[in-house]
Image (tube, rainbow, N blue to C red):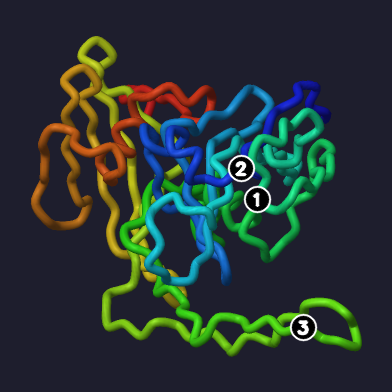
């Protein structure tokens, strides 16, 4: 599969000059690797008829620091595409053939041209994101769960000391001394909770009134991923309101949809928004 369009990548621009690309967007946590943390805009998430999932994303170092949001350590935002059937990815940052070097980060280095789809390697951040966005299946369950939202993040590593660079006269070049091991910030906080949409299915309860439902599962993001609870999320698409009901016990909560980066707002958009074929529609009578 080949992409014909040529895309100008923002990779080589300092994000501080790119504030407008972040300011009016909604960014929520998608994945964390050993060294990076990935955010994506759930309102850009879509899938076409060929199973290509597209979304906008950026990543930044996972180390805890005092830098301002959207600082020069951030890469992106850029369009990302994943082939769920073929296990391949395409990234806007690969397409740099016609990039205009307005403000390169280092010197006037000419970027290396990228090419087409590349295979997603296992045990990588992209493989983790693929499993979240393309769905993950449990051995003892017929359902396939699709990522929706994560509340809080894993503890961030903190560098003990910044790397020290010295000049090696024999090698006639700058060399970096080995960095001390990073330490994980100690915390007594509860592990993060993440929510998934069961089978990526939205049930149309009342088409005329715009009432739709999602079945959600929540898990703790620690060893063995213990399950927390199941919910039924009901969205009133016309009234911009919702209700969420635990399936076992607990009180039903309902209100008007609030801030766009909240669990409720993202769930509401997943139920009522236009995501191509990403969401599977079913009717209440067909269940």
How far apart are labels 3 and 2 at the CA level? Answer: 29 Å
Say what secondary structure mark 2 lies in: loop
Q: Is residue 253 left or right of residue 181?
A: left
For discs 3 and 2, the disc positioned in front in the rendered view? 3
Q: Within 10 angstroms of label 2, few (less than 14), some, or many (20 or more) residues? A: some
- Closer to the chain start, of discs 3 and 2, is 2
Q: Quadrant of the N terminus?
A: top right
Q: Residue at x 52, y 53 (%)?
A: 72
In the rendered view, would you say 107 is above or below 174? above
Residue 140 place in picture, x, y as percent = 51, 62
Residue 262 place in picture, x, y as percent = 27, 45
Say which quarter of the image contains residue 215.
top left
Q: Which residue is mark 2?
A: 13
Q: Which mark is residue 65?
A: none
Q: Is residue 286 left or right of residue 5?
A: left
In the rendered view, would you say 166 is above or below 104? below
How far apart are labels 1 and 2 at the CA level? Answer: 6 Å
Q: Within 10 angstroms of label 3, few (less than 14), some, or many (20 or more) residues? A: few
Q: Which mark is residue 105?
A: 1
In the rendered view, would you say 111 is above or below 59? above
Residue 261 place in picture, x, y as percent = 31, 43
Q: Is residue 216 left or right of residue 80?
A: left
Q: Residue at x 58, y 50 (%)?
A: 75
Say which quarter of the image contains residue 198.
top left
* Nearer to me, 225 or 4: 4
Number of numbered tags placed on the structure image: 3
Q: Which residue is mark 3?
A: 167
């Amino acid at each position: 599969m080949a992409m014909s369009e040529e895309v100008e990548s923002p990779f080589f621009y300092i994000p501080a000059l790119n504030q407008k690309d972040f300011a009016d967007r909604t960014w929520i946590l998608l994945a964390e690797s050993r060294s990076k943390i990935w955010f994506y805009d759930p309102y850009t998430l879509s899938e076409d008829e060929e199973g290509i999932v597209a979304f906008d994303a950026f990543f930044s170092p996972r180390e805890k620091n005092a830098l301002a949001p959207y600082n020069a350590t951030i890469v992106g935002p850029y369009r990302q595409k994943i082939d769920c059937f073929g296990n391949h990815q395409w990234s806007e940052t690969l397409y740099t053939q016609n990039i205009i070097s307005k403000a390169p980060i280092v010197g006037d280095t000419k970027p290396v041209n990228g090419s087409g789809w590349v295979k997603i390697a296992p045990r990588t951040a992209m493989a983790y994101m693929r499993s979240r966005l393309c769905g993950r299946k449990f051995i003892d369950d017929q359902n396939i769960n699709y990522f929706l939202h994560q509340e809080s993040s894993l503890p961030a590593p903190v560098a003990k000391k910044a790397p020290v660079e010295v000049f090696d006269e024999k090698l006639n070049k700058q060399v970096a001394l080995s960095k001390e091991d990073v330490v994980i910030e100690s915390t007594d906080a509860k592990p993060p909770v993440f929510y998934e949409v069961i089978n990526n299915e939205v049930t149309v309860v009342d088409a005329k009134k715009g009432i739709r439902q999602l079945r959600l599962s929540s898990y703790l993001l620690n060893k063995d991923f213990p399950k927390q609870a199941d919910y039924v999320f009901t969205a009133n698409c016309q009234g911009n309101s919702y209700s969420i009901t635990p399936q076992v016990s607990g009180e039903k909560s309902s209100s008007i949809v609030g801030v766009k980066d909240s669990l409720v707002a993202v769930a509401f958009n997943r139920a009522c928004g236009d995501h191509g074929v990403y969401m599977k529609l079913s009717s209440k009578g067909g269940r």
